[in-house]
Amino acid sequence: MSRVRTVELRPGEESIRLGQLLKLVDAVPTGAQVKDVLLTGTVRVNGEPEERRGRQVRRGDVVSVEGMEDVRVG
């Protein structure tokens, strides 16, 4: 069973863009590399492949990146 890390949104925020979340959890070193990582097909949101860095990720969503622990948005 894989571990799940929880990332809390700031008070008043309802969502975060996927690209921002990937940078926040160190899945990519720079914003410029977000698109490349998404195009590899290794990023999933709630189990579904996702390629849009602007995708709004909301509380309760789980983001999976191959080779990293899953991230739940809280």
Image (spheres, grey):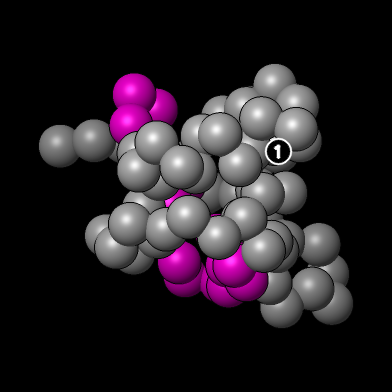
Q: Crowdedness of circle 1 by 10 Å Cα count: few (<14), some, many (20+)?
A: few
Q: Residue at x 47, y 70 (%)?
A: 60
Name the foreground residue: 70 vs 54.
54
Q: Residue at x 27, y 60 (%)?
A: 47
Q: Residue at x 39, y 36 (%)?
A: 40
Q: Is residue 4 visible?
A: no
In terms of image quadrants, where is residue 14? bottom right
Left or right: 49, with 13 as reference point? left
Q: Secondary structure at mark 1?
A: helix
Q: Which residue is mark 1?
A: 24
In terms of image quadrants, where is residue 4? top left
Q: Residue at x 52, y 48 (%)?
A: 6
Q: Position of residue 2 (x, y in %)?
A: 23, 35
The range drawn in magenta is 55-74
Left or right: 49, with 29 as reference point? left
Name the foreground residue: 66 vs 38.
38
Residue 36 to residue 4: above or below: above
